[in-house]
Amino acid sequence: MSGLADTIRTVRGRAVRCRDTGDGPPVLLLHGIGRTLADFAELHGRFARDHRVISLDLAGHGGSAPLDGPHTLAALARAAADCLDALGVPGPVHLVGNSLGGAVAMRLAVDDPARAASLVLVASAGFGREVTIGLRLLAVRPLARLPRARTHLFADTGHLPQVERADEFHRLVTGFWAGRTAGR
């Protein structure tokens, strides 16, 4: 999709490339390893019709500078949260992550559950024992913070269904956010 303007923000002294468009409940789109926010360009515009959508290049990717320390999941999740803070987004956001971005989204949801309105994982990377335990705890009542879950398999796609099947992906995710089941 053309017409989306990227900006470079300084967040905690580090350059971060991001897109921030639309109005409504906030959404954070996180790409995979070796990729950029361009992976979500088409969906960014679609989601922005009724959501505030933030895409960012993860630290050390695309137009974002690397972190000073190791690029652990916790550090990448903290950097994403810092970007949300810098953009004035303090509350819960819909987290959408592909591959490494999915692992970062999971880590952010575990480290700061109040920040996660929902969690959409797209061909997500492995995420280690510390995140697995945290996600399991989030699913245990009365601790449950993320009460709904849905699994969907996209037929005949590779690692980027948000690109390869953008229309179906958009309908599925916005339906999930609205509380609709897949059959409605």
Image: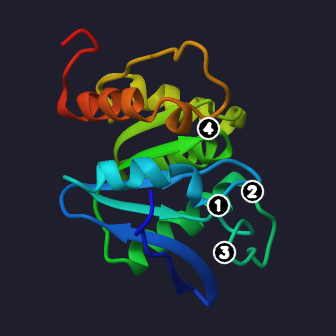
Mark closer to the observer (3, 1): 3
Label 4, label 2: how many angstroms apart (C-alpha)?
12 Å
Cβ atoms at labels 2 and 3 below 8 Å apart: no
- Name the one closer to the observer, 139 or 32: 32
The residue that mark 1 highlights is 76
Label 4, label 1: how many angstroms apart (C-alpha)?
13 Å
Disc 2 residue crowd, few under 14, some 14–19, many 20+, Cα 10 Å: few
Residue 134 numbered mark, or none:
none
The residue that mark 3 highlights is 64
Q: Position of residue 52 (x, y in %)?
A: 27, 61
The residue that mark 2 highlights is 72
Examine the rendered structure and indicate whether residue 181 appears above or below residue 44: above
What amino acid is found at the position of numbered circle 2 in the picture?
A: Thr
Quadrant of the image occupied by residue 60: bottom right
Cβ atoms at labels 1 and 2 below 8 Å apart: yes
Residue 131 numbered mark, or none:
4
Q: Identify the residue at image location x=80%, y=73%.
A: 69
Assign a secondary structure to mark 2.
Answer: loop
Q: Earlier in the sequence, mark 4 or mark 2?
A: 2
